């Protein structure tokens, strides 16, 4: 190959295997040549240009020179009218022949790799005579690589310069080119890309070759089977060298026309751009490339191939015909009859097909008369567009705007379509408003055949220190409501949070529904509808060094009408908390402090209300060692009330002060072992926890927010068996527990764990949640045991049980057993059993399992053994290919055991990289099937 270096179109270093020649135009209009860096005086050889029968490309030399590069820079040397042809000769004696000088206005440079010779080759500067307009151009290039599929001629060992055409075949082979339309040298400014008239047609320009098709997908992973989400990337580093580098097998340089023609494996690079073609003309004044034959252009985020292309290196404007293109961030592809590059980000295509499916697969595609793509905004706009799925057109739009990545834009979002017994046919058509980069809104009309039109809206904002969401829904007239019920229904939700100043933060959550049945009737059918209370809460928090403050206002709207008014929760208006944790103090001590002030209100006029102040300071001395730990702790809790509507005969200002002592200690033992052939570290960890709190009558204290804690292995080590501050359990007890674990010796992963524990009481527990509650006098608690193990790479199991040895009959109070299978192919199987004495006994089966490579079955069956009813059942199929997903689910569910079942059908079609039509079944499956996930 002929390495080229153009400085102002005429800077030509020739790299050869035996020696390196560097020839460039001199200031006096001649040539300066260097062989391996040593200046060689020019010894010209006279050569007459044949008037007819020029040598054909079949006379190309066999040998090739190494690949070089060229840097195109602004012209810095004076204009030279004389044209020369430089040919490195292969024999020193031939270089010594006399030469005649003839003037010419064209320039031709020929170079070929010389054969091995005891003496280095010398360049021969050959002036070429000027020809008439009807004759062939005198600009010629010696081809060192034959790209025209012609038979190479044997290389002559002694090329000579003769007057007759037949003798020139013995010289270095020459490829003659027709004279193109001249380029006016006076043009200095960059103009739009000219029409393709500068070059005669060639056979390579008729159709794109397989080579360009292979290049366009070079390095692209079409096997990923998912469209990766766009993420804002840092801008590309600025290019310090904005020169244009050109590599080619041969070149014709036209100095007077400020034009250079390159042929054979042409590669042009400028910054992050790359152009490849069989032939390229570089127009210096316009800074334009005129390319044909297997043209390939690569820009950041875009690749284009075509038959011919005009491209301006400065404005990034260009046009091409019979094109194929790729978007690389994320992956998408298409083809068009023509393409126009408007700038570095925007492009325009006509008669186009567009899809994100991999090559060879067009399950869905957009066919449009015109397509505009803007990489800077991530938007594609199609005119007179049809969306085809499996070859069938099912949507026609005269105008369609769609995302080419996941950045936000205003427009219609995918509609949701379904049906249920509550609402009938149900369709939602959201419209999205992209107000600002950190602010948006959505307006969603929802049409229900049984109930009417519901209008919904959402507003969101996000700043550096604040974020918020406001949602509202309104159904002006519900056709399903009776005449005695208000048919105007609605709901609202406000979520705000932020950090206005360092250490200070706020969190607001306000919810409202118009009636108790709103969520059951109008809540989204794929969401849980069993909520009993709607929270309204506002928090202000300060986080200091080792301490924090919380200010809270909280109320609840009870939407379960079956809950009696006296059983509904209290409001906290306000609640103030101050907590302190100071470790590593004097002598290794840790200081603890918990303080709280709350004003409790209630909607019932008969309920006791009032204020509560709770103060609990404490001190502990943690002692930890590799073989174990021991932590003694002492605290004092004082609680003071100021009450209204207090029970007759009881004080309006009761109080309670109690100390608590705890001793917490454990040991660690370990040894090496084996678990199903895996080397493990086997541990044995005994744990003792002693707790003492004296007994005190607390029957005069109200019950604002206190309840019994659930019994579990973790709760064996708590200092109070009640939640909240209204009750402090009396205790003189010792918890004994034992845990054993198996840790992989190579990875540290926990392969199995088993724990068992029980509390031994040294006295009866007199303090109960209700003053009338019976004293508990058993000398020990229920036994709690938990176990978890990794059965194999994909199988896991968890189990837990709470067993009461003092009960007669049914000793098991709680139990759970779960077996889970999950592999890398997203084959999922979950089997779970849950039991709580007197309230819950359920089986839960969920799965995702392949039917074929692309087709999966999904389902869940949650059955209540206690009530003999299915609480939730759904089944469906999921088909996924590399460019689209379809899901269909049939669901029957009830909000509680006494409610009627609700049957619903849901369908989703997701065209990867374009849109999703129907309900968001993928989100529902993630909630309903443990381990299910999507690629997004």
Image (cartoon, rainbow, N blue to C red):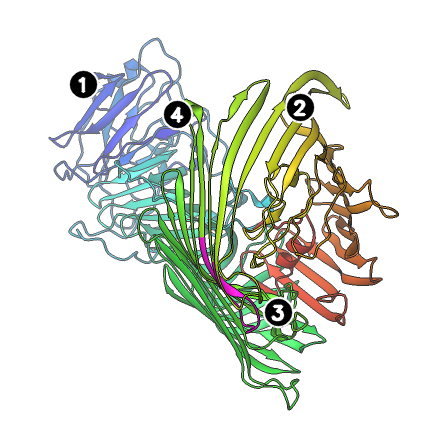
The residue furthest bottom is 483
Looking at the image, the residue that sits furthest to the right is 809
Residue named by callout 4: 586
Compute the Cα span from label 1 to label 3: 111 Å
- Front position in the image: 296 or 908: 908
Query: What is the distance, in whole Å, between disc 4 and disc 3 at their CAs?
Result: 49 Å
Which one is earlier in the sequence, the residue at label 4 or at label 3?
3
Q: Give the range drawn in magenta.
A: 597-611
Q: Indicate the secondary structure of the residue bearing disc 4.
A: helix
Q: Which quadrant of the figure contains the N terminus? A: top left
Q: How crowded is mark 3: few (under 14 residues within 10 Å), some or many (20 or more)?
A: few
Quickly name the residue at label 1.
41
CA–CA distance between discs 2 and 1? 77 Å
In the image, residue 3 above or below residue 637: above
| Of labels 1 and 3, the one closer to you | 3
**Residue tagged 2:** 744
- State the SS at label 3: helix
Query: Residue 605 colored magenta?
Result: yes
User: Badges 2 and 3: C-beta atoms under 8 Å apart?
Assistant: no
Which residue: 66% across, 88% down? 482
């Amino acid at each position: 190959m002929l390495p080229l270096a153009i400085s102002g179109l005429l800077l030509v270093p020739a790299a050869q295997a035996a020696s390196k020649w560097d020839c460039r135009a001199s200031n006096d209009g001649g040539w300066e040549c260097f062989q391996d860096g040593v200046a060689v005086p020019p010894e010209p050889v006279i050569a007459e240009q044949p008037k007819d029968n020029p040598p054909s490309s079949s006379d190309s030399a066999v040998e090739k020179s190494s690949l070089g590069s060229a840097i195109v820079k602004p012209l810095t040397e004076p204009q030279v009218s004389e044209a020369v042809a430089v040919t490195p000769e292969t024999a020193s004696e031939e270089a010594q022949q006399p030469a005649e000088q003839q003037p010419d206005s064209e320039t031709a440079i020929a170079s070929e790799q010389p054969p091995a010779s005891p003496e280095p080759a010398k360049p021969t500067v050959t002036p070429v005579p000027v020809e008439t307009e009807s004759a062939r151009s005198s600009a010629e290039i010696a081809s060192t690589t034959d790209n025209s599929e012609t038979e190479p001629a044997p290389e002559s060992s002694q090329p000579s310069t003769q007057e007759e055409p037949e003798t020139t075949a013995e010289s270095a082979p020459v490829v003659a080119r027709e004279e193109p339309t001249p380029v006016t040298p006076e043009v200095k400014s960059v103009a739009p890309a000219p029409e393709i008239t500068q070059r005669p047609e060639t056979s390579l320009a008729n159709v794109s070759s397989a080579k360009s098709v292979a290049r366009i997908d070079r390095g692209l992973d079409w096997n990923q089977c998912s469209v990766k989400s766009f993420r804002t990337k840092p801008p590309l580093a600025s290019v310090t060298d904005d020169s244009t580098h050109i590599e080619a097998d041969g070149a014709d340089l036209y100095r007077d026309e400020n034009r250079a023609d390159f042929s054979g494996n042409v590669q042009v690079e400028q910054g992050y751009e790359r152009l490849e073609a069989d032939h390229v003309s570089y127009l210096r004044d316009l800074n334009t490339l005129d390319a044909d034959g297997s043209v390939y252009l690569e820009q950041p985020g875009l690749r284009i191939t075509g038959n011919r292309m005009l491209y301006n290196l400065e404005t990034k404007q260009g046009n091409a015909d019979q094109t194929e293109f790729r978007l690389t961030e994320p992956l998408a592809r298409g083809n068009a009859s023509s393409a126009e590059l408007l700038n570095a980000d925007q492009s325009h295509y006509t008669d186009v097909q567009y899809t994100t499916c991999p090559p060879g697969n067009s399950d869905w595609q957009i066919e449009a008369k015109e397509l505009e793509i803007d990489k800077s905004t991530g938007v594609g706009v199609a005119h007179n567009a049809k969306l085809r799925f499996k070859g069938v057109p099912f949507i026609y739009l005269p105008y369609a705007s769609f995302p080419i990545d996941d950045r936000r834009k205003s427009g219609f979002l995918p509609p949701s379509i379904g049906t249920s017994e509550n609402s009938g046919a149900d369709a939602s058509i959201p419209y999205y408003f992209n107000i600002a980069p950190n602010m948006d809104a959505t307006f969603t009309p929802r049409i229900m055949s049984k109930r009417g039109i519901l209008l919904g809206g959402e507003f969101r904002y996000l700043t550096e220190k604040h974020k918020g969401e406001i949602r509202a829904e309104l159904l002006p007239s519900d056709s399903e409501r009776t005449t005695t019920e208000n048919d105007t229904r609605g709901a609202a939700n406000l979520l705000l949070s932020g950090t206005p100043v360092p250490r200070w933060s706020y969190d607001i959550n306000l919810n409202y529904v118009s009636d108790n049945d709103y969520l059951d009737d109008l809540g989204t059918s794929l969401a849980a509808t069993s909520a009993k209370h709607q929270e309204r809460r506002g928090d202000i928090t300060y986080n200091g060094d080792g301490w924090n403050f919380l200010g809270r206002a909280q109320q609840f709207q009870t939407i379960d009408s079956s809950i009696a008014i006296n059983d509904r929760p209290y409001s906290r208006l306000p609640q103030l908390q101050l907590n302190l944790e100071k470790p590593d103090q004097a002598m290794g001590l840790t200081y603890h402090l918990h303080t709280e002030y709350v004003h409790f209100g209630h909607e019932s006029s008969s309920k006791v209300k009032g204020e509560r102040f709770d103060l609990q300071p404490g001190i502990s001395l943690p002692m930890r060692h590799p073989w174990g730990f021991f932590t003694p702790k002492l605290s004092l809790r004082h609680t003071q009330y100021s009450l209204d509507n207090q029970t007759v005969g009881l004080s309006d200002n009761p109080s309670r002060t109690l100390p608590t002592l705890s001793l917490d200690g454990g040991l660690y033992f370990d040894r090496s072992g084996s678990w199903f052939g895996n080397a493990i570290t086997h541990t044995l960890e005994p744990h003792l926890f002693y707790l003492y709190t004296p007994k005190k009558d607390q029957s005069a204290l109200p019950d604002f927010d206190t309840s019994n804690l659930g019994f579990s292995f973790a709760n064996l080590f708590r200092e109070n068996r009640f939640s909240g501050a209204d009750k402090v359990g009396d205790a003189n007890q010792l918890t004994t527990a034992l845990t054993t674990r198996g840790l992989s010796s190579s990875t540290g992963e926990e392969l199995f764990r088993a724990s068992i524990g029980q509390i031994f009481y040294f006295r009866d527990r007199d303090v109960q949640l209700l003053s009338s509650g019976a004293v508990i006098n058993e000398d020990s608690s229920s036994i709690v045991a938990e176990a978890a193990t990794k059965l194999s790479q994909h199988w896991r199991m968890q189990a837990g049980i709470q067993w009461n040895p003092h009960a007669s009959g049914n000793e098991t109070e709680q139990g759970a057993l779960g077996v889970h299978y999950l592999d890398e192919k997203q084959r999922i199987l979950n089997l779970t059993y849950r039991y709580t004495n007197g309230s819950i006994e359920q089986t839960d089966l969920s799965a995702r399992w392949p039917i074929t490579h692309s087709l999966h079955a999904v389902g869940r069956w949650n059955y209540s053994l206690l009530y003999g009813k299915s609480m939730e059942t759904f089944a469906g199929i999921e088909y996924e290919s590399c460019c689209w997903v379809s899901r269909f689910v049939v669901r029957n569910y009830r909000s509680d055991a006494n409610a009627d079942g609700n049957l619903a059908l849901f369908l989703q079609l997701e065209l990867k990289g374009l849109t999703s039509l129907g309900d968001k079944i993928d989100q529902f499956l993630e909630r309903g099937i443990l381990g299910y996930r999507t690629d997004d």
